[in-house]
Amino acid sequence: MTLLHVHDYGGDGPQLVLLHGYGRSLNDWDAAAALLTAGHRVLAVDLPGHGRSPRTSPWTIPSVVRHIADTLDAHGVPEAVVVGHSLGGLVAVEYARANPDRARAAVNLDGFWWGREYPGAERVSAGLLASAGAIAPPEYIEQQVVNCARLGIPADRAEAAARAAARPLPDGTWQTLPERAEALEIVDELHALGALGVSTWLNGVDCPVLLVQAGRRPPPAPGMEWFGEFSARFARGVSEELAALSHTRPTISVDRIDATHPMNLEAPEMVATLVAGFVRGLPA
């Protein structure tokens, strides 16, 4: 049994379990969780190989879902609404699929991916994996804060999140997470889910699901204009699938947030309001 690192934010009300994105940690949820505790019991989990959770091999969606279930058992959480951002959103939906008696509902915040054959996917994967598990220089945290400032994320929030998502090394450098072997396995899992397309992927998930897209694209970094075009094209395709699903699957709700992809860092108030409203509308 593998138990994952958890932070208990407290609160009282319907149980929420929060999951973070690739290369991130549960600290990304600090600001939104503080708002959600007003009406919910809130727990956040570091995914395997991220934050302060142990590594796991192989890193597969079924094994991660089992580790989350074991961890929630250890913390006395028999049922919850599972809320995930990015990679965590995909895992939240898969947790609901595997645990229909334990997942009251799932929320996926901009957690969509593409198959290997999707035009441009190979270039995106190569860029993602080029820095996977790298040893970053001492100024890494400061660089992350500068990058976040482009999205309006406050410096203190960005710094705390960046420090929690990497491991400090004795010489002042930083080990970025997940390490490379796990990163390769995670990307394989993402491509396998993405190849299904959103509609097919969601077949067999019977609990209420809220699917949320980022409403804005980030300003392109110099030399990365091609990625802006790639992500905008992919987002349009996802939007079309989600619109069709919202009309044919009564358990699926679709929404959009006026923020870019790291919405739980950029717009925690909007994320908390959307999640709380969704939970209030669930069947008793």
Image: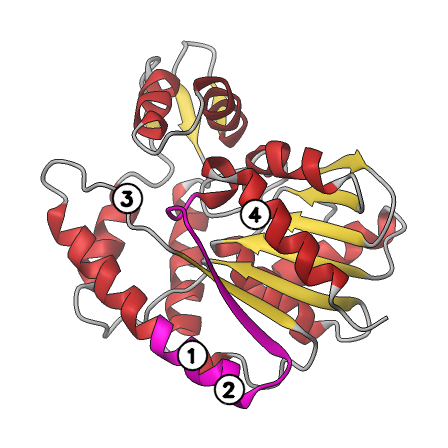
Q: CA distance from mark 2 to mark 1?
A: 7 Å
Q: CA distance from mark 1 to mark 4?
A: 20 Å
> Quadrant location of the C terminus?
bottom right
Tell me the SS state at disc 3. Answer: loop
**In this view, 199 is above or below 49:** below
Q: CA distance from mark 3 to mark 2?
A: 29 Å
Residue linked to disc 1: 243
Under mark 4, the amino acid is Val
**In this view, 218 is above or below 222:** below
Picture coordinates of residue 239, whole percent (x, y): 36, 72
Residue 177 seen:
yes
State which tag comes first along the sequence, 3 or 1: 3
Of residues 230 and 210, the one drawn nearer to the viewer in this rendering: 210
**In this view, 215 is above or below 36:** below
Q: CA distance from mark 3 to mark 1?
A: 23 Å
Q: Quadrant of residue 11?
A: top right
